[in-house]
Each structure stands twice: as C-alpha cells, then as structure tokens.
C-alpha cells in the first residue's frame, strides 16, 4: 500500500511539474507575441520600418535586462548568504538590469543608425529619370 501511495505522489509531482513547464512556455510565447505585435504596430503607426525595429530592440533588451538582473540578484543572494525573502536585492537587481538593458538598446540603435547612414552614403544613388513631356506649340 505504501508503494502505491509513493508512486501516486510521484506521478502527481510529475504532472504538476509538466503543467508548470507548459504554463511557462505559454507565458513566454504570449510575451514574445506581445513584443512583436507592439513593434509591428509601432512601425505601422510611424510608417517606418526602422521605428518598428527600434521598438523591437528596446523591448527585447528591456526584457533581457530584467531577466539578467533577476539572475544577478539570485546569484548575489546565494553568494552573500542573505535570506531569500530580503526585498532589496530583488528590487535593485532587476531595476539595474532594466536600466542597462535599455541603455544597451539605445546604444545599439545609435550604432545601427550610423551604420545604415554610412552604408547608404557609400552606395550610388539611383535617380529615376522621368522624361519631360513634349510641348507642342
């Protein structure tokens, strides 16, 4: 009887773990879809593909900064042997990660814009020649 109970508890734990993994994947997919759709909407409303890419870079960098800051907080709490319930590392870490993520995105957007301008200046310009209408006198 004890073995049946242990197997049932183990099965319940596996099912709950799988449900947690599926929920995490669904949330990740929804966040990714939200970032992409917001970037596309920005590009459409601004009538500029580059604005859409700038919005995409900013949003992705902000999310990655939050994740990196949270992982940094977790490592700091582990190395400093602080209680995991202390709120200061959990506030400071993701905030610093977010700020640096947005700063990196702004720097990337600046460098990307300069690169595109430099490449565009090196390419020959094609002028479409429209013939002048013939005037009859």
Image (spheres, rainbow, N blue to C red):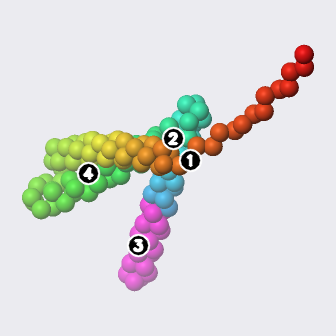
Looking at the picture, tell me which residue is in the foreground, 122 or 84: 122
Of circles 2 and 1, which is in front?
Answer: 1
Q: Point out which mark residue 9 bears.
A: 3
Q: Is residue 132 left or right of residue 74?
A: right
Of circles 3 and 4, which is in front?
Answer: 4
Looking at the picture, tell me which residue is in the foreground, 70 or 24: 70
Whether residue 38 can be seen here: no
Mark with earlier residue (3, 1): 3
- Residue on which the image places disc 4: 69
Query: Is 130 located above or below residue 109 in the figure?
Result: above
Alpha carbons under labels 3 and 1: distance apart: 71 Å
Q: How many marks?
A: 4
Residue 62 at x, y percent in the picture: 36, 45
Mark with earlier residue (4, 2): 2
Query: Is 38 located above or below residue 63 in the figure?
Result: above
Residues at marks 2 and 1 touching, judged by CB atoms closer than 8 Å = no
**Which residue shows up at 86% across the image and 26% down it?**
134
Residue 99 at x, y percent in the picture: 27, 41
Alpha carbons under labels 4 and 2: distance apart: 28 Å
Mark with earlier residue (1, 4): 4
Alpha carbons under labels 1 and 4: distance apart: 45 Å
**Which residue shows up at 45% across the image and 63% down it?**
21
- Residue on which the image places disc 1: 124
Of circles 4 and 2, which is in front?
Answer: 2
Q: Please report the bounds of the magenta region as a residue range.
A: 1-21
Residue located farthest toward the top when viewing the structure as drawn: 137
Looking at the picture, tell me which residue is in the foreground, 11 or 60: 60
Q: Point out which mark residue 17 bears.
A: none
**Which corner quadrant holds the N terminus?**
bottom left
**Which residue shows up at 48% across the image and 59% down it?**
25
- Would you call the spot at circle 1 few (<14 residues within 10 Å), some (14-19), or many (20 or more)? few
Q: Point out which mark residue 50 bears.
A: 2
């Amino acid at each position: 009887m004890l073995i049946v109970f242990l197997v049932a508890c183990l099965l319940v734990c596996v099912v709950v773990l799988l449900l947690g993994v599926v929920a995490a994947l669904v949330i990740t997919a929804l966040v990714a879809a939200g970032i992409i759709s917001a970037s596309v909407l920005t590009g459409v409303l601004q009538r500029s593909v580059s604005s859409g890419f700038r919005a995409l870079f900013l949003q992705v960098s902000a999310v990655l900064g939050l994740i990196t800051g949270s992982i940094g907080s977790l490592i700091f709490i582990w190395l400093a042997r602080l209680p995991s319930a202390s709120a200061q590392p959990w506030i400071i870490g993701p905030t610093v990660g977010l700020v640096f993520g947005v700063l990196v995105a702004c720097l990337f957007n600046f460098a990307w814009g300069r690169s595109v301008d430099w490449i565009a200046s090196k390419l020959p310009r094609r002028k479409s020649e429209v013939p002048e209408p013939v005037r009859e006198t």
